[in-house]
């Protein structure tokens, strides 16, 4: 019989890709998502009738227990989070609530339901910045933003529950994801949206911050390798090796849109902005025979085309986004 996955944050960017791939791979799937500004069930249209969806907050212990009792999942994939660094700088409160307390609730409840695996979605940002070289799984955690501190705490809680209670936790630390359905507050969709509208494109500082760009379907493919063959108690970095300066990413998008680079406007840098993230992903390659398949060029072409074709979805978010942009770009 196929295993049952319980996916938290399944109406989000990466979670929805996980659901689409999970359904295709024949897994049973239950989702917990409270549909924050970042959650949207339209992302899972077409597969929704094949899954159970619970609109619920992961900090609601009673309801989470009810879902575990009802669904009896074998594997928990914990993706629900407040995920945007800039928002954590404006107000850390929901980051502490969801990312730390919510993770604790899921870990606590999981202890009592005989699960086989708990995949704890962390991030490369927990390592902090690195000017040269790469972070390995054993590198110390040294997070700098309220977001990355909340994720590092959740990451360490997961490892503590594995060591202390033998909860079968596996920690995954992916680099920056991009692709279709990403909420248009993140760099790539913001640039596509503003570029298409020929609005000024805000770039923090001098645009020299470096991120490692991982296409979302590759990230989810890696997570399935980890679900199926990963070792309990281990940490896996998931990176693509595609490191790019922000300014170069913006220029690639403008080139694909056929728009002028004069739209670029450098704005006051993000507070505490990490200069560079870079992952050594040899372990997942060596142990699970995984590597990213989609090149940056192919992924960007695919992503830009998707946003151009799905601008109505993005436009539906614009009123909310404009209020928020007023707070971050100045
Ligand atoms: N996007 C990236 O580049 C990236 C990179 C590395 C790691 N991650 C991690 O991957 C996970 C998914 O990221 P994403 O980009 O898909 O995020 P996202 O913001 O697109 O989606 C998050 C989802 O979680 C839900 N959610 C938030 N708070 C909740 C709560 N209290 N209860 C239930 N549901 C809640 C939201 O409604 C949303 O559907 C997060 O844990 C994030 O930290 C993301």
Image (cartoon, grey):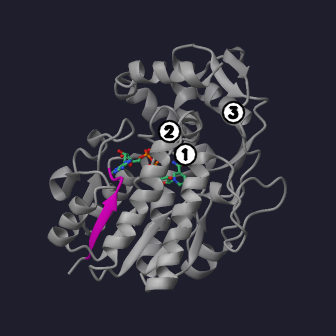
Task: Please state the horizontal and vertical placement of residue 108, each as a whole percent of the image.
Answer: 36, 72
SS category of the residue bearing label 2: helix
State how far apart marks 3 and 2 are (Cα): 25 Å
The residue furthest bottom is 166
> Which residue is at a point 41% across and 78% down the rendered structure image?
228
Q: Residues within 10 Å of mark 3 (few under 14, many from 20)?
A: some
Depicted 231 relative to depicted 55: above or below: below
Tell me the tag on residue 270.
Answer: 3
Which mark is drawn over residue 74? none
The residue carrying mark 2 is 303
- Dividing the image into 4 quarters, which one contains the N terminus? bottom left
The residue range painted magenta reads: 3-10
Which one is in front in this view, the residue at disc 3 or the one at disc 2? 3
Quickly name the residue at label 1.
Answer: 299
Indicate whether residue 4 is drawn in magenta.
Answer: yes
Position of 4 relative to 146 (above/below): below
First reached walking from the N terminus: tag 3 or tag 2 = 3
Tell me the residue at 44%/31% (across/down). Answer: 307
């Amino acid at each position: 019989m196929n295993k049952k996955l319980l996916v938290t944050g399944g109406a989000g960017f990466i979670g929805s890709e996980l659901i689409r791939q999970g359904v295709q791979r024949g897994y049973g799937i239950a989702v917990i998502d409270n549909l924050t500004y970042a959650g949207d069930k339209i992302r899972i249209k077409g597969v929704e009738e094949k899954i159970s969806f619970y609109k619920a907050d992961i900090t609601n212990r009673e309801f989470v227990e009810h879902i575990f009792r009802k669904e009896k999942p074998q594997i928990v994939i914990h993706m629900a989070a407040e995920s945007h660094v800039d928002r954590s700088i404006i107000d850390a409160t929901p980051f502490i609530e969801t990312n730390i307390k919510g993770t604790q609730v899921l870990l606590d409840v999981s202890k009592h339901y005989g699960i086989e695996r708990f995949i704890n979605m962390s991030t490369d940002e927990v390592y902090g910045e690195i000017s040269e070289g790469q972070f390995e799984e054993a590198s110390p955690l040294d997070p700098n933003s309220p977001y990355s501190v909340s994720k590092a705490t959740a990451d360490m809680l997961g490892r503590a529950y594995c060591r202390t209670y033998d909860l079968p936790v596996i920690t995954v630390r992916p680099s920056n994801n991009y692709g279709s359905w990403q909420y248009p507050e993140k760099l790539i969709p913001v640039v596509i949206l503003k570029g298409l509208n020929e609005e000024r494109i805000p770039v923090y500082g001098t645009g020299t911050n470096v991120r490692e760009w991982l296409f979302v379907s590759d990230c989810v493919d890696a997570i399935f390798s980890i679900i199926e063959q990963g070792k309990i108690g281990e940490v896996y970095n998931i990176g693509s090796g595609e490191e790019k300066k922000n300014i170069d990413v913006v220029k690639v998008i403008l080139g694909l849109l056929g728009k002028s680079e004069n739209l670029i406007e450098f704005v006051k840098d993000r507070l505490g902005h990490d200069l560079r993230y870079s992952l050594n992903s040899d372990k997942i390659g060596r142990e699970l025979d995984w590597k990213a398949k989609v090149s940056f060029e192919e992924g960007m072409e695919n992503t830009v085309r998707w946003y151009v074709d799905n601008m109505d979805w993005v436009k539906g978010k614009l009123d909310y986004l404009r209020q928020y942009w007023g707070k971050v770009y100045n």
